[in-house]
Image: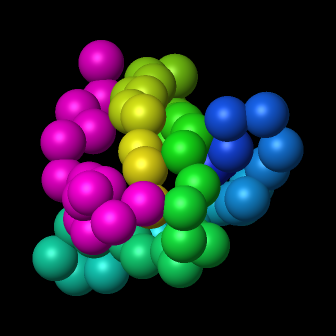
Amino acid sequence: MTITDSHGAALVDTDATTYANGFVGFWIPKDVTGTIVVTKDGKTAESPFSSDPEGATCVTTLPLA
């Protein structure tokens, strides 16, 4: 799992195990935009994010393709 800001700096770069409900959680600093990338068994999901006041507090649509 990697979460990078819009400048390419890594905010998160780690292996992660989901909770029983399929979710995993990370705290991101406010007013940051960037990209979330999840990779598992050769499949990758990618999504932009924003932690500004209009940004989503939860990203739930990262299907592995």
Q: Quadrant of the C terminus?
A: top left
Task: Determine which quarter of the picture holds residue 64.
Answer: top left
Instruction: Specify the farthest residue to the right.
Output: 9
The answer, for residue 38, to whether it is visible in the render is: no
Left or right, 52 with respect to 28, comes to left
Choose between 4 and 2: the one closer to the eye.
Answer: 4
Left or right, 56 with respect to 7, comes to left
Image coloring type:
rainbow
Instruction: Specify the farthest residue to the front.
Output: 53
Left or right, 34 with respect to 61, comes to right
Specify start and end residues of the magenta stretch as a single range: 52-65
Choose between 58 and 25: the one closer to the eye.
Answer: 58
* Residue 40 drawn at (x, y percent): 48, 38
Q: Main secondary structure of the magenta part?
A: loop
* Residue 4 drawn at (x, y percent): 68, 44
Choose between 25 and 32: the one closer to the eye.
Answer: 32
| Residue 57 is one of the magenta-drawn residues | yes
Task: Determine which quarter of the picture holds residue 56.
Answer: bottom left
